[in-house]
């Protein structure tokens, strides 16, 4: 029996909010989406200044079939919205002293590199990626689509049996280091989990699925910028008659007897049968709900380990920068030390690793002719003391290392500079317990 239409308020216009709003509207619910910023995208917002177009959120386009599947739900395909380009090389990793690996799009070429670096590692990588493919397919077709109301959703013969093959009880670090010894190979395989919210030794081996996404499925780029995804999702949402309200920061979710009643902004109140919060869990619970409707107190959140923040420098440079590719990873310092300073002993890093994205290498539309659009990202522990002086200190450290890699100085050619510290709180995959009508968005196909 089909459920009767409900009034749904979705908080947040990022990927999760836009996709959930579109799917619920497709199911004939009356959906209003509230976004606090003046534009949609959440952390995937865009900044346009002086001819430079900066994506302020994600810059890696992996798992292209996930986006394709979403578009297909509405009778669309990726090519209806943007052109995807596969990057080759996918990215480069700088290990220092002229040791730079340009990761090829071809798996076979990567296998040859592993074998050249460490005897026997090539065939080990082939076997590793075969298992990683199995994990990826199981996870993407089964695990991620579970509602996650209870751990018992995962307790059945199929999931228990697969858990052993998925190495759910072994760490990713142990899985990788049991096969590969050379530090460059280990770093290449461990880095994709850096932003998952834990170190490789505290991340289940299941997440080798990310290595399959990286090395087998490839690294892509939507021409025009990552914000093309937001534009595509906004187009679908409006086509599904979602009411989108920007500049509407939610100040309170009103709940009575476990049932959402209203959502308040500074200027308006929205009646709701259901509220889906795409805002961070901690913010949603601690700032939008009354204390009587919260599950966790402040002490819980103070003790909770958050995923890293990032110190990010957005730079417009009035010349091209030698040696850069679209994606560049600087692993010329100790990865383990930096990881400890994020998760175990939080403080500003001693010798930071960092990432440089230069989309203008691939896409002429994101920077004026002959110029470079780049951003530099340094992973950082959440909740640290911050100051303009600290930011400038680290900018100088990173830019000097980048100039050394490029082989020539270019700091005097920077014509545009913006600095932010981006907080990336770990998102829960569980609904807010005891609040059956106030949910965190956590899957791509909500049903009411």
Image: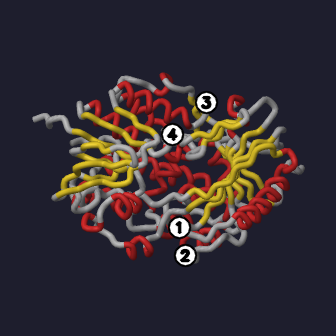
Residue tagged by mark 2? 344
Would residue 156 be found to the left or right of residue 231 on screen?
left
Residue tagged by mark 3? 223
Q: Which residue is drawn at 76% across and 65% down?
A: 393
Indicate the secondary structure of the residue bearing disc 1. loop
Nearest the eye: 130 or 11:
11
Would residue 439 be found to the left or right of residue 192 on screen?
left
Q: Residue at x 48, y 38 (%)?
A: 40
Residue 135, given in percent of the width and then of the height, sits at 41, 51
**Upstream in sequence: badge 3 or badge 2:** 3
Q: Distance between the residues labelled 3 and 1?
A: 33 Å
Q: In which quarter of the image is residue 435?
A: bottom left
Q: Quadrant of residue 49?
A: top right
Indicate the secondary structure of the residue bearing disc 4. loop
Q: Residue 214 carries which label?
A: none
Residue 302, given in percent of the width and then of the height, sits at 44, 74
Indicate the secondary structure of the residue bearing disc 2. loop
**Upstream in sequence: badge 3 or badge 1:** 1
**Upstream in sequence: badge 2 or badge 1:** 1
**Upstream in sequence: badge 4 or badge 2:** 4
Q: Distance between the residues labelled 4 and 3?
A: 24 Å
């Amino acid at each position: 029996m089909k459920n009767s239409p409900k009034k749904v308020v979705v908080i947040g216009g990022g990927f999760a909010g836009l996709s959930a709003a579109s799917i619920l509207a497709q199911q004939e619910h009356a959906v209003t989406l509230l976004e606090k910023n003046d534009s949609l995208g959440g952390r995937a917002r865009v900044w346009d200044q002086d001819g430079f177009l900066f994506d302020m959120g994600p810059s890696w386009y992996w798992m292209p079939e996930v986006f394709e599947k979403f578009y297909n739900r509405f009778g669309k395909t990726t090519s209806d919205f943007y052109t995807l380009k596969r990057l080759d090389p996918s990215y480069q990793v700088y290990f220092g002293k002229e040791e730079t690996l340009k990761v090829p799009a071809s798996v076979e070429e990567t296998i040859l590199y592993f074998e050249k670096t460490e005897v026997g590692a090539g065939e080990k990588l082939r076997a590793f990626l075969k298992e990683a493919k199995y994990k990826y397919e199981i996870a993407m077709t089964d695990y991620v689509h579970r509602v996650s109301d209870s751990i018992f959703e995962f307790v059945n013969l199929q999931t228990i049996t697969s858990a052993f093959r998925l190495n759910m009880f072994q760490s990713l670090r142990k899985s990788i280091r049991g096969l590969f010894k050379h530090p460059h190979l280990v770093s290449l395989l461990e880095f994709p989990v850096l932003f998952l919210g834990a170190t490789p030794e505290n991340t289940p081996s299941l997440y080798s699925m990310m290595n399959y996404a990286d090395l087998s499925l490839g690294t892509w780029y939507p021409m025009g910028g990552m914000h093309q995804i937001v534009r595509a999702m906004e187009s679908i949402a409006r086509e599904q008659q979602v009411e989108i309200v920007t500049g509407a920061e939610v100040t309170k979710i009103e709940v009575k007897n476990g049932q959402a009643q209203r959502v308040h902004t500074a200027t308006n109140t929205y009646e709701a049968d259901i509220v889906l919060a795409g805002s961070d869990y901690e913010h949603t619970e601690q700032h939008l709900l009354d204390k009587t409707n919260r599950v966790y107190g402040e002490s819980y959140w103070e003790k909770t380990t958050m995923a890293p923040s990032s110190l990010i420098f957005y730079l417009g440079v009035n010349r091209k920068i030698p040696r850069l590719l679209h994606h560049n990873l600087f692993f010329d310092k100790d990865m383990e030390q930096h990881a400890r300073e994020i998760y175990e002993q939080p403080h500003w890093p001693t010798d930071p690793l960092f990432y440089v994205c230069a989309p203008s290498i691939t896409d002429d539309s994101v920077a004026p002719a002959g110029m470079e659009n780049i951003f530099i990202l340094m992973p950082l522990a959440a909740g640290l003391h911050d100051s303009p002086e600290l930011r400038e200190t680290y900018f100088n450290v990173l830019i000097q290392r980048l100039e050394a890699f490029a082989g020539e100085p270019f700091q005097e050619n920077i014509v545009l500079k913006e600095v932010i510290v981006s907080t990336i709180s770990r998102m829960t995959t569980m609904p807010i317990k005891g609040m059956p009508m106030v949910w965190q968005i956590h899957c791509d196909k909500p049903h009411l």
